Amino acid sequence: MTIWHAERGTGEPVVLLHSTATDSGMWDHQWEALAERFRVIKVDFRGYGHTPYQAEKPYNHADDVARVLAALGVTQAALVGSSGAGRVALELAAAGLAGRLVLLNPISTLEPTPDLRAYWEEEGRLLERGDVQGAAELNARTLLGPEATDVAWRRVVEMQRHAFEVQLAADPEPEQFEHEVSPADIDVPALVVAGAHDLPYFLHSAHHLAGELPRARLVELEWAGHLPALERPEEISSLLLDYL
């Protein structure tokens, strides 16, 4: 299995882990900015971007990333995870691969709430009807905050639609699993970012996770939705540079 990845720059390693509504292209601006000071690595998970959607046995995103890092000779890095990739970053941190964490609107250990379930159900209904474009647009409409440009909206739709098409075409569909993780045991510096215009679940999740992680600091962005790296890319690049 080949996991697509790219690296740029020199210095301490920083790994960019994308939301499951996008692919590694969501980090285009941060990739450029961070590479001036760090060795930046970005990865496409299976079924996203340039990585195919296949597996001979059940797979795990964090295991895939860990193997990429091992192949690159990276034993520890700053991990930046958006949304569902926040869980991937936590699993990598639990395995000792994180020097520090930045988690943007992350999923935590909280159970899904009605707002999140309603979003998922509508997405599933559209996909069952074969309306892949409609499902991709639903994601852009739901996840992007009021500061997002038309360019960002089109980019999310493009990345999400591609992921849907690749994953729906898989036969057989690969089976994925998660490792158990206890945030209270992850004793590394962490910045948890919450978007004020995000779904209530993700807001609660960010606050909850910031309270669980022993060395976390919470920052709430009044202007942001769920994907601030695309909504105000320059501001998120500055935030990452300042913190890292």
Image: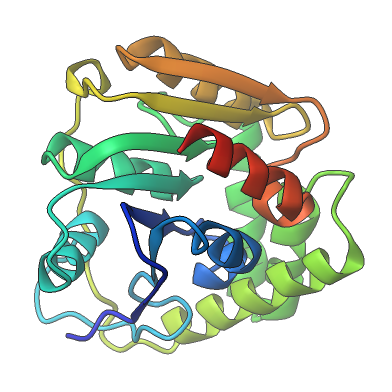
The reply, left or right, for residue 186 in relation to residue 9 is left
User: Which quadrant: the C terminus?
Assistant: top left
Instruction: Work out whether residue 131 can be spotted.
Output: no
Instruction: Work out whether residue 105 can be spotted.
Output: yes
User: Which quadrant: the N terminus?
Assistant: bottom left
The reply, left or right, for residue 19 in relation to residue 136 is left
Against 12, residue 65 (above or below) is: below
**237 vs 138, nearest the viewer:** 237
Q: Residue at x 21, y 24 (%)?
A: 186
Instruction: Report x, y in % for residue 74.
Output: 16, 59
Against 104, residue 63 (above or below) is: below
Q: Residue at x 43, y 79 (%)?
A: 167
Q: Quadrant of residue 173?
A: bottom left
Q: Quadrant of residue 7?
A: bottom left
Q: Quadrant of residue 161?
A: bottom right
Instruction: Report x, y in % for residue 224.
Output: 76, 37
The image shows a total of numbered marks equal to 0
Instruction: Report x, y in % for residue 106.
Output: 48, 36
Instruction: Report x, y in % for residue 84.
Output: 44, 47
Q: Residue at x 61, y 71 (%)?
A: 160
Q: Residue at x 62, y 75 (%)?
A: 159
The reply, left or right, for residue 42 in relation to residue 2 is right
Against 50, residue 10 (above or below) is: above
